[in-house]
Amino acid sequence: MNSEKPIYVTQPFLPPLEEFIPYLEKIWKSKVLTNNGPFHRELEQTQCRYLGIDYISLFANGTLALVTALQALRITGEVITTPYSFVATSHALLWNGIKPVFVDIEPDSFNLDPALIEAAITPQTTAIMPVHCYGRPCNIEAIQHIADNYNLKVIYDASHAFGVRDDGGSILRHGDLSVLSFHATKVFNTFEGGAIVCPDAKTKTRIDHLKNFGYVDELTVVAPGINGKMSEFNAALGLLQWKYVDQVLAERHRIDSAYRVKLEGIPGIRFLPLPEVQIGNYAYFPILVGPEYPLSRDELNDQLRQHNIYPRRYFYPLISEFPMYRGLPSARRDNLPVASEVASQVLCLPLYPELEESEQERISHLIRSFVKKGSL
């Protein structure tokens, strides 16, 4: 049996428990557990200041936020999106009765390829829903140009993009709406949580109604909304996380940089170049395992697991390959050659603030050692 300490692809950052006790005491004393309580309001204000945005609406999770964002903009018909994402991206479309139309990705960013969007537009197309994959910004200018030409809405799935900035500020300011996830695996987490970044107060008010059953007041319901509210417990966890967010981002940057040095020059191992942004968040560290490497991606994944290292084939399979999507014409593999190749080669290595240098060295050493040993 392997006695080495298990290393997982990610672990949530948890501040000291004793620091959370005062928040719990305030919740117990106030007896306000949900419904836009004081911690909820404070977290929204704190996020706006930190992220450099004007309006944000907190949610119980990012998936509910995606569903509500589509409802808020009254999206119908067809939406152009990426097959290279977590299934929640496309599930949110199906739950709203919207048909996903898959377009291939760029080989150097893994984001939706703007050069292929126009060919996928039909009279039924109402929006584009790109993903800032691994926190790397999409080609925002090209996507917006197409959206403006065809009068389409743009909703960014920004689940990976917390804290990412370009020269003009937060990338969350782009598009009609941006949706964040605060799941436990994300750079900033509230255990479970999410948010919609809103361009104005009117849009935020509509979204706030939609996430609370459509209620305006006790006697007035204006829309068939859902229960998407974030609890006071999760909001309090978020407020505590803010104290450490810069430290967390700095540690992720350090680990990302170390991987680039330790894995440099290994035949068949490719990693993405650093994105051209002012501030990144180093949300994931994906490598591509090409044919020059002696093991296939799946063989390398299995070998690492035998050494108690648990990377993730993220994203594999493609969304378009799941049963509820593979019947769509746009889901054909010959329509998605780049995404199909990337999905067959990608392996996300462990990356989280408390990953020790010795653990990262063990991961890198094993990947390099298989080259010397050859195929197994």
Image (cartoon, rainbow, N blue to C red):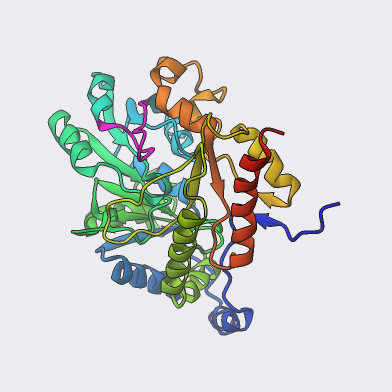
Taking 229 as reference, is 96 above or below it? above
Residue 37 visible in this rendered orientation of the protein: no
Taking 342 as reference, is 244 above or below it? below
Verify whether residue 108 appears in magenta.
yes
346 or 103: nearer the eye?
A: 346
> Which residue shows up at 33% across the image and 25% down it?
78
What residue span does the magenta drawing correspond to?
A: 102-114
The spot of residue 165 in percent (x, y) is: 28, 59
Q: Quadrant of residue 39?
A: bottom left
The spot of residue 246 in percent (x, y) is: 41, 72
Verify whether residue 59 appears in magenta.
no
Question: Mainly helix, strand or loop, the magenta region?
Answer: loop
* Apparent side of residue 133 relative to residue 151 in the rendered image (left or right): right
207 or 139: nearer the eye?
A: 139
> Which residue shows up at 31% across the image and 65% down it?
51
How many marks overall?
Answer: 0
Instruction: Name the outermost residue toward the left.
Output: 149
